[in-house]
Amino acid sequence: MSQDNKEYEKLKTDKKQNEQKQSSTQAQIDDLDDKIKAMKDAYKAIDTAKEELKDIRKAIKKMPSEYDDKWKGRVSKEVYTSCKSDGELYSFYTSYIDAIDEIEDDLNLKLTEYENEKINQLMWLPAAFHVHGRWRYDCSVVC
């Protein structure tokens, strides 16, 4: 086998390995894209629920003043006490909203982790080719 044929076979093998690496890396990127989409969808759903809870809490806070004139006796006093800003019902909604804020923070951290991992994969995506016995990385493809 001549030197040219050996070099040609080596280049074919290198190309095949590079294509396999690119395929594997692309599969990892696709998986990360799926995770990122799922995280964004979850965040959006949770944020929508949080906004609805805030609307309910706002309505609860207004309840004592809006219904004070209409309700009499013990019921009026219970509504006023539980709905005012330091009342039990208002406080429960505030704690639910605070808990959702913490969940959103955790989702954002995980989302950032996935996005950074994707960036790492893209930076090292084999955009390499063999030139004169050396690997040359064409950063313009992914940078």
Image (cartoon, rainbow, N blue to C red):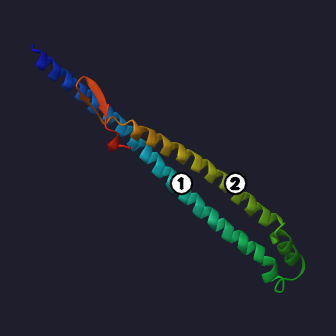
x and y percentages locating residue 91 in the rendered image: 79, 62
Q: Callout 2: few (<14), some (14-19), or many (20+) C-alpha neighbours within 10 Å?
A: few
Q: Which mark is residue 118?
A: none
> For the C terminus, which image quadrant?
top left
Identity of the residue drawn at 32% across and 31% down: 21
15 with respect to 63 (left or right):
left
Instruction: Pinpoint residue 59: horizontal percent, then vertical percent.
Output: 72, 74
- Residue 82 place in picture, x, y as percent: 83, 69
Q: In this rendering, is residue 39 above or below 49?
A: above
CB contact under 8 Å: marks 2 and 1? no
Quarter of image, res 76: bottom right
Q: Give the camera-side residue of 94 and 88.
A: 94
Which residue is the site of mark 2? 99
The amino acid at mark 1 is Ala
The x, y position of residue 6, in whole percent, is 15, 17
Q: Nearer the viewer, residue 55 or 121?
A: 121
Query: Which three-letter amino acid code belongs to the residue tagged 2?
Result: Ala
Residue 2 occupies which quadrant of the picture? top left
| Category of crowding for the residue at label 1, using alpha-carbon neighbours closer than 10 angstroms: few (below 14), some (14–19), many (at least 20) | some
Please count the marks in the image.
2
Above or below for 86 versus 128: below
Is 92 above or below relative to 27?
below
At x 50%, y 56%, the residue is 41
User: Vertically, is 102 above or below 81?
Assistant: above
Sequence-first disc among 2 and 1: 1
CA–CA distance between discs 2 and 1?
A: 15 Å
Q: Residue furthest left?
A: 2
Element on which disc 1 rests: helix
Which quarter of the rendered picture does the N terminus lie within? top left
Q: In this image, 69 relative to 42: left or right?
A: right
User: Which residue bears the numbered disc 1?
Assistant: 42
